[in-house]
Image: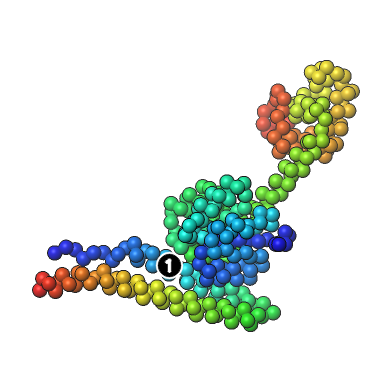
Amino acid sequence: MINPQSETVFIVDDDPDVCRAVGRLVRGAGYEVREFNSAHDFLEAHEPEPLGCVLLDVTMPDVDGLQLQESLAASGCRRPIVFLTANGDVHNSVRAMKAGAVNFLTKPVDREVLVAALAEALAIDAAGRAEWETRNTIASRLATLTPRERQVLEKVVAGRLNKQIAAELGTVEKTIKVHRARMMQKLHAGSLIQLVEIAQLAGVKSEGASWTRGQLPCA
Amino acid sequence: MSNPPLVCASELVTLLHELNQPLTAILSNAQAAQRFLSNTMLDRAELHDILADIVADDKRAVGILTRMGQAIKESQQPARDNIEEGA
């Protein structure tokens, strides 16, 4: 098991000498290292949980680096990839970058260049995970809303006033105020601005939005 | 007389790419060793392994260069034969 707190670099290269040497270099830079001599070995043993990135050789027998990139994406794994290639092939580099690669480096690679590219990839992984966690937290909080609170939420982020919401839902303003306060509390929203941000992150549809993007509804 | 065939280009390209592998390993090993040397706790066994790998990869690179030389020589052989036949 990899320590989930440490940053791991998964090195995939069919050349064992290169794998071992680059592994030493990366370990020397303070990262955990996992070495794989084929795309198959990597896919078999890859743990998606730990924070990390893949350092991937392009040219490999059987499954090459670009195919591995595709199958990782297809499996829903968003682990950032830094490619390492023996030839600065423009066609492959364009293809890899379009498919979301963080960088495309040419062998032999200098330590500083490699370490900088890995640091960038690891930062992207950390940011992606943080965003995912935020969305997850919001989704679980949203799930605790009653259907009525959910309705109020959609109308509030659409810019409706309490009075309007009450009329639309066939109740009195006082009741809406109670629903609204409870909904805000459940979503941990301290202000209307925060509530709108939360709703946007969660992809909540604002019912009959009367305001345009970038503009906040008035309370 | 036909032109001498260009050095079998695809074979040379393959060998050139192959040459990148030991050179990559040598550079990474050497830079890893430089890093290890700056550590206060020097792992002599690790350093020993690194140097052994550098030696092996250097020999591997030489082997690839030799094959490249042979490929070039072979591709020039028919041309020389043609010249001799014509003489």
Q: Is residue B87 left or right of residue A69?
A: left
Q: Quadrant of the N terminus of chain A?
A: bottom right
Q: Is residue A120 visible?
A: no
Q: Residue at x 26, y 64 (%)?
A: B6
Q: Residue at x 43, y 74 (%)?
A: B61
Q: Position of residue A14 (x, y in %)?
A: 51, 64
Q: Position of residue A145 (x, y in %)?
A: 81, 33
Q: Residue furthest left?
A: B87
Q: Residue at x 46, y 77 (%)?
A: B58
Q: Position of residue B78 (x, y in %)?
A: 20, 69
Res. A55 image quadrant: bottom right
Residue A116, placed above or below residue A193: below
- For disc 1, the chain is B
Q: Residue at x 62, y 53 (%)?
A: A79
Mark 1 neighbour density, 10 Å: few (under 14) some (14–19) many (20 or more): some
- Kindly identify the amino acid type of the residue bearing the numbered disc 1: Glu
Q: Which one is in front, A174 or A55?
A: A55
From the image, tell me which residue sits under label 1: B18
Q: Is residue B22 visible?
A: yes
| Total numbered labels | 1
Q: Quadrant of the C terminus of chain A?
A: top right
Res. A25 image quadrant: bottom right
Residue A98, placed above or below residue A17: above
Q: Is residue A11 left or right of residue A186?
A: left
Q: Which one is in front, A144 or A188?
A: A144
Q: Is residue A163 left or right of residue A34?
A: right
Q: Which one is in front, A24 or A70?
A: A70
Q: Position of residue B48 (x, y in %)?
A: 59, 82
